[in-house]
Amino acid sequence: MISPWKTSLPLEKYSSERVVIYFHNDEQWVPIKHCYLLKAVALYQKTIILSGKEVFAFPPDLDPNIFYKLT
């Protein structure tokens, strides 16, 4: 699942917000790690370079599996 969106850098005031990084695997979202948004952007870029895959950051209180099952 490759997104056409470009990754923009978060505003400084949001860079220390906590997020959960997820990977989409077949029919489910797999949580990988909790971290700060700025670290998530760095991990996103590193993941693209090393594996060609995308990871996604969501707020800690949002489980993307709930929305995925509704579609």
Image: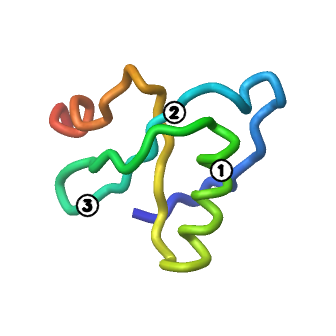
User: Callout 1: 10 Å neighbours few (<14), some, many (20+)?
Assistant: many
Residue 51 rendering spot, x and y as whole percentages: 48, 78
Residue 36 rendering spot, x and y as whole percentages: 61, 36
Q: Earlier in the sequence, mark 1 or mark 3?
A: 3
* Element on which disc 3 rests: strand
Side of 51 where 66 appears, left or right:
left
- CB within 8 Å, label 2 to label 1: no
Side of 53 where 71 appears, left or right:
left
Residue 16 or residue 63, whichever sits in front: 16
Residue at image coords 18%, 31% = 70
Q: Earlier in the sequence, mark 3 or mark 2?
A: 2
Real-space Cα distance between discs 3 and 2?
19 Å
Side of 2 where 38 appears, left or right:
right
Q: Quadrant of the N terminus?
A: bottom left
* Element on which disc 1 rests: helix
Residue highlighted by disc 3: 25
User: Callout 3: 10 Å neighbours few (<14), some, many (20+)?
Assistant: few
Residue 66 rendering spot, x and y as whole percentages: 22, 30
Residue at image coords 52%, 58% = 3
Q: Earlier in the sequence, mark 2 or mark 1?
A: 2
Residue highlighted by disc 1: 41
Identity of the residue furthest to the right in this view = 12
Residue highlighted by disc 2: 19
Q: Amino acid at mark 3?
A: Asn
User: Callout 2: 10 Å neighbours few (<14), some, many (20+)?
Assistant: many
Q: Amino acid at mark 2?
A: Val
Q: Amino acid at mark 1?
A: Val
Residue 11 or residue 4, whichever sits in front: 11
